Every structure is written in structure tokens, then in C-alpha cells.
Image (cartoon, rainbow, N blue to C red):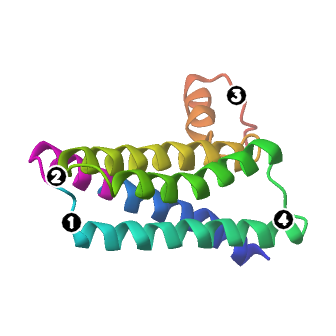
Amino acid sequence: MNRIVVLHANLVFTILLAFGALGVWALVAAALKRSPGQLFLSGFAIGALLVIAEVAIGAIMWAWGLRPPQPEVHLIYAAVALASLPLAHRYARNQPARQQSLVYALACLWLCAIALRAIETGRPPGVGHESHELHELQRGVIDVPSL
């Protein structure tokens, strides 16, 4: 069961990297007044498959009783992520080259924002705040028993 949790956590970071890179690619294409091109669209499709896999893994975890601390919000982010990509593609394909690139860039960066929010709603309370605890320890706020 732990492996699926790790897979779910790691896949979201893969999605962030992929759509972050695709977003930059589309912004560069827009700056050059070009469409993103077929290679970009292939990457976009692969990214969409990653999102579908992430949601499917999340559904399996849900069926096994593994729920995030904020389940309703987490589910909304999953639904928004699934709906955003096909909507962006449908809208972008009929646009002139530069606008097409801008729509794809916005969709990719939007998905990155949704993924970051999903990470926050899926993280158990207190996890991921180690740097704050380390800072408190360094300041002497937290007492450490001596040996």
C-alpha cells in the first residue's frame, strides 16, 4: 500500500515538471509568434495521460480507504485538472498561431497551479514543514532533551 502512495506523490511532481516545461515552451513559441508545433502537442498529450494516471491512482487509493485530509477540495482539483486540458486543446486548435501558444501556455501553467494546490490539500497536517521545525530548533524555541 505504501508503494501506491509513493507513486501518487512522485507522479504529481513529474506532472509539475512536464507541464512547467511545456508552459515555458509554449510561452517561447508565443513570443516568437509561432504555434507550439506537433512535438509540443505530443508532449501535451503525454502530460494529459500522466494526469489521467494520477487521477486513476488517486481513485484506487480512495477505494482502498486512503483519503487526503481535505478530500472534497482534493477531488475538485482532480476534476479541474482532468477537465482543463481537453478544454484548452479544444479552444486552442482554432486560434491563430500566437494565441494558440498563449492558450496552451496558460493551460500548462494553470495545471501546475492546480497540481501544487492538490499537493497542499493531500498532505497530512504537519508534513512538509520540517524547515520550520528546524528553524525553531536552531532558535532554541524547541527543547531537545540532553543525553
* Mark 2 / mark 4, whichever is N-terminal: 2
**Label whose residue precedes the other's in the sequence (3 or 4):** 4
Instruction: In the rendered structure, find residue 142 and report the number of the disc placed on it.
Output: 3
Kind of element beneath mark 3: loop
Region of the chain picked out in magenta, as a range: 22-34
Nearer to me, 1 or 43: 43
Q: Which of marks 3 and 1 is in front?
A: 1
| Secondary element at image label 2 | helix
Q: Nearer the viewer, mark 4 or mark 1?
A: 1
Q: Identify the residue under disc 1.
A: 37
Residues 39 and 121: in front is: 39
Q: Residue at x 73, y 65 (%)?
A: 58
Which amino acid, mark 2? Ala
x, y percentage for residue 25?
A: 23, 55
Identify the mark at residue 144; answer none if there is no mark: none
Residue 145 vs 17, above or below: the answer is above
Residues at marks 3 and 4, CA–CA distance in whole angstroms: 36 Å
For discs 3 and 4, the disc positioned in front in the rendered view: 4
The reply to whether dot 2 and dot 1 touch (C-beta < 8 Å) is yes
Q: For label 1, count other residues whose C-alpha is less than 10 Å away and answer few (under 14), some (14-19) or many (20+).
A: few
